[in-house]
């Protein structure tokens, strides 16, 4: 699974795809230009994830559901507490999707 598939299914990835689709449908962008924007965003996001993310976060919460399918773990936590060096944040419900990064480069 390419790296971009992980964040394309996130909120920011879905919003970008929907926005580009809307711009193509109303004639503001050509399909070719929309594809170039998407490819450039993929490259930028992959580079940022690989080089700029250095924070560590600890997560505590009540495990509601977990699943392992096709080498991808999915966890749903309730009443989660995220702690980092910058502070902490309580979240009522969170979905975490994780996979082995070694599998991404295959």
Image (spheres, helix red, strand yellow):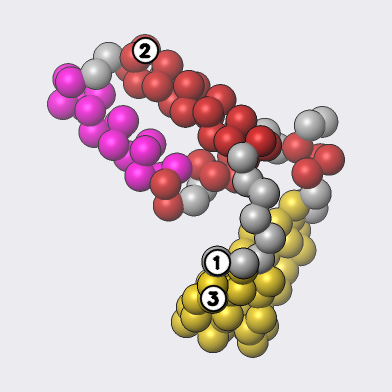
| Identity of the residue drawn at 36% across and 12% down | 32
The answer to which of 79 and 26 lies nearer the viewer is 79
Q: Where is mark 1, residue-wise?
A: 86
Q: Is residue 14 magenta?
A: yes
Q: Residue at x 31, y 30 (%)?
A: 20
- Determine whether, in the image, residue 37 is placed left or right of residue 44: left
Find the distance from the CA under tag 1 to the CA under tag 3: 7 Å
Sequence-first tag of 2 and 1: 2
**SS label for mark 1:** loop
Quarter of the rendering occupied by the C terminus: top right
Tell which residue pokes out farthest to the front in this image: 85
At label 3, counting other C-alpha atoms closer than 10 Å, the crowd grade (few under 14, some 14-19, many 20 or more) is few
Q: Residues within 10 Å of mark 2 (few under 14, many from 20)?
A: few
Magenta extent:
13-28
Q: Which residue is mark 3?
A: 88
38 vs 83, nearest the viewer: 83
Q: Mark 1 against mark 3, which lies toward the viewer?
A: 1
For the residues labelled 2 and 1, the Cα–Cα distance comes to 41 Å
Residue 75 visible from this viewpoint:
no
Residue 42 coordinates in the image, percent (x, y): 53, 29
- Where on the picture, by quarter, is residue 24? top left
> Is tag 3's residue or tag 2's residue first in the polypeptide sequence?
2
Residue at point 75%, 52% (across, down)? 99
């Amino acid at each position: 699974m390419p790296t971009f598939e992980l964040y394309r299914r996130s909120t920011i990835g879905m919003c970008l795809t929907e926005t580009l689709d809307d711009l193509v449908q109303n004639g503001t962008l050509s399909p070719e230009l929309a594809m170039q924007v998407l490819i450039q965003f993929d490259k930028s996001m992959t580079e940022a994830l690989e080089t700029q993310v250095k924070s560590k976060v600890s997560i505590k919460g009540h495990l509601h559901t977990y699943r392992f399918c096709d080498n991808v773990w999915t966890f749903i936590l309730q009443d989660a507490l995220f702690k980092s060096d910058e502070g902490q944040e309580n979240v009522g419900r969170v979905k975490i999707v994780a996979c082995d990064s070694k599998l991404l480069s295959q």
